[in-house]
Image: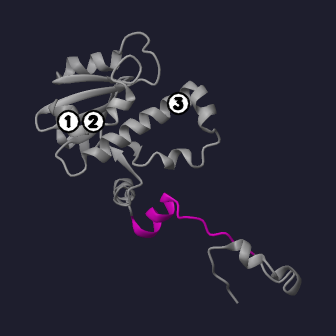
């Protein structure tokens, strides 16, 4: 006999005496990507498309002047709902706020989620950029207008080498520092991505 169910604790309840030693729980977890690739021949890009369609996460393409190179780039994973990062996190809000690296990742993820969610239904596209160890957190393009966005969760320290390299290479219409000494996060989260580009 095989018992199927989504509540293993209920399966065990009441069976310890009547079926003692005669039943076994075999957990069947969610499919991992390698299993789905083997079974269905999925490429990573297709799997990310499915996750994006479910509103969970997506893969940002690397910004390039050539669209062919964008499609061939390694994606930067970006959650569409930051609860996917925090729900199972070992740190609560006060602890995360006191840990600069953790807080920085959470703020950057929240900024990315806002850009993607607020660009839905518009022609705004969201990318990242990285080259030779220098990077820009997000790049938003709408038509021919390009805005480079760097995220800081605390006071800015030193130069923004990635932003400077991006400006020299692509000459964006605008650069934007979000958080830290730049645009306050509260104001940023009230501004749709398209409005950031069009000004």
Q: Is residue 185 above or below residue 68?
A: above
Mark before the other along the chain sequence, 3 or 1: 3
Query: Which-is-in-front pick, marks 2 and 3?
Result: 2
Disc 2 + disc 1, Cβ < 8 Å: yes
User: Label 2's element?
Assistant: loop
Q: Does the magenta stretch include residue 101?
A: no
Mark before the other along the chain sequence, 2 or 3: 3
On the image, the x and y values in percent for residue 177 come to: 32, 22
Q: Which of 48 and 68 is in front in this view?
A: 48
Q: Nearer the viewer, residue 50 or 64?
A: 50
On the image, the x and y values in percent for residue 106 come to: 49, 35
Would residue 114 be visible to someone looking at this image? Answer: yes
Query: Which-is-in-front pick, marks 3 and 1?
Result: 1
Find the magenta span and give its range: 25-41
User: Label 3's element?
Assistant: helix
Location of mark 3 (residue):
103
Q: Is residue 35 magenta?
A: yes
Which of the colour schemes (rainbow, by chain, secondary structure, one colour) is used?
one colour
Q: In this view, does 163 lie above or below 145?
A: above
Location of mark 1 (residue):
195
Q: Nearer the viewer, residue 101 or 41?
A: 101
Q: How far apart are marks 2 and 3 (CA)?
A: 22 Å
Q: Which residue is drawn at 67% across and 86% down?
A: 2
Q: In this view, does 56 lie above or below 61?
A: below
Q: How crowded is mark 2: few (under 14 residues within 10 Å), some or many (20 or more)?
A: some
């Amino acid at each position: 006999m095989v018992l199927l169910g989504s509540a293993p604790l209920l399966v065990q309840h009441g069976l310890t005496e009547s079926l003692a030693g005669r039943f076994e729980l075999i957990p069947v977890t969610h499919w991992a990507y390698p299993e789905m690739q083997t079974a269905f021949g999925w490429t990573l890009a297709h799997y990310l498309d499915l996750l994006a369609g479910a509103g969970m996460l997506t893969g940002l393409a690397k910004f390039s002047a050539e669209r062919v190179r964008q499609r061939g780039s390694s994606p930067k994973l970006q959650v569409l709902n930051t609860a996917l990062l925090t729900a199972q996190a070992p740190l609560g809000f006060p602890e995360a706020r006191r840990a600069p690296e953790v807080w920085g990742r959470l703020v950057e993820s929240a900024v990315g989620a806002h850009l993607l969610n607020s660009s839905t239904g518009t022609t705004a596209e969201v990318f990242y950029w990285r080259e030779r160890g220098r990077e820009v957190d997000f790049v938003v393009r709408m038509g021919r207008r390009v805005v480079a966005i760097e995220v800081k969760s605390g006071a800015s320290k030193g130069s923004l080498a990635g932003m400077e390299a991006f400006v020299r290479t692509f000459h964006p219409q605008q650069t934007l520092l979000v958080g830290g000494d730049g645009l306050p996060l509260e104001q940023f989260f009230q501004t749709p991505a398209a409005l950031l580009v069009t000004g």
